[in-house]
Amino acid sequence: MNTLHNLPANENYHVDHSTSYHSAKKDINLSSWQHAKRGNIGQSQHSTTPLLDYKNLLTSSALYQMSMGLLPDLWQVCLDLYHTFLDKSTPFTAMQFIPVLKKLLSINHQEMERFLENQDTHHVLIQNELLKVVLIHWQPGKYSPIHGHPAGGCVFKVLHGSIEEKRYTPDAEPQLIAVSRYDKGSMAYIDDHMAYHAVGNPFDRTAISLHVYTPGLKKS
């Protein structure tokens, strides 16, 4: 089912305030945080991938909320996800994000507690022509509608708690074909050639997952 559980990694992310630049203080200098985060994204001289303005890599909402400590500081993860496009020819696939997500192992407890107190539960961190990154807080009982992921597909990873995925036949009248539970550290890939799916939290504990998509752009 293209399910990937607890894959090994040589270099890991442990998202922790002790190594991040942001502060939860309301008088934070947002421009200073932005400057600290903006390294040179760079581009291979052989790459045909269009460069994004790194100032706009994150959505304005994600940039603000990370700087205020309302979202986990996933700047480096987002930057590394973008880097996967620089030396790769189209069409793209969400499978290219797996090495990056393998390195994302944990979120600092205090940072996670602040995030779970955030009234918003669906956070778009990046949305552009190359990729979309969404961080989701799944409250118990919450479920997405049945949906598909065309072209480049989707990879998701559980960062806290457990979620459930129901897979359906990818047609006009979807029929249930599989139900899977994903615990912390688990990853999975899906696209419309495989199935449609619905994701949710039928358990009694809150959950957090990170979802990354690409439209799989083709060369013109």
Image: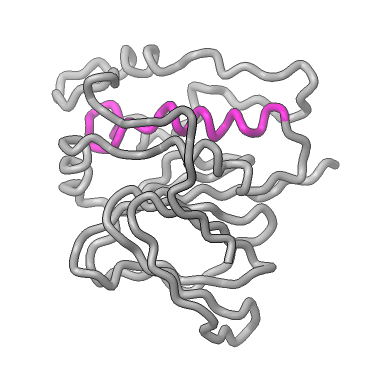
The reply, left or right, for residue 31 in relation to residue 132 is left
Position of residue 115 in the picture relative to residue 11 (left or right): left
**Residue shown at 57%/19% (left/top)?**
41
Classify residue 48 as left or right of residue 143. right
Where residue 80 appears, x then y in whole percent?
A: 52, 29
Please indicate whether residue 55 sits to the left or right of residue 151 in the image: left
Residue 39 percent across, percent down from the top left? 48, 14
Whether residue 182 is in magenta: the answer is: no
Residue beneath the point at 31% across and 39% down? 106
Quarter of the rendering occupied by the N terminus: bottom right
Depth check, front residue: 162 or 86 = 162
Choose top left, top right, bottom left or bottom right for residue 21: top left
Instruction: List the single residue furthest toward the right.
Output: 220
Q: In this view, does 8 lie above or below 189?
A: above
* Color scheme of the displayed model: one colour
Residue 121 picture location, percent across and down: 29, 54
Question: Split into 4 quadrants, where in the image is the C terminus?
Answer: top right
Q: Is residue 85 covered in magenta? A: yes
Rendering quarter of residue 218: top right
Where's residue 60, x and y in %?
A: 40, 33
Give the total of numbered labels.
0
The correct choice, above or below, for 120 with respect to 55 in the image is below
* Residue at x 24% of width, y 62% of height: 139
Q: Give the range drawn in magenta.
A: 65-87
Looking at the picture, tell me which residue is in the foreground, 62 or 153.
153
The residue located at (72%, 19%) in the rendering is 44
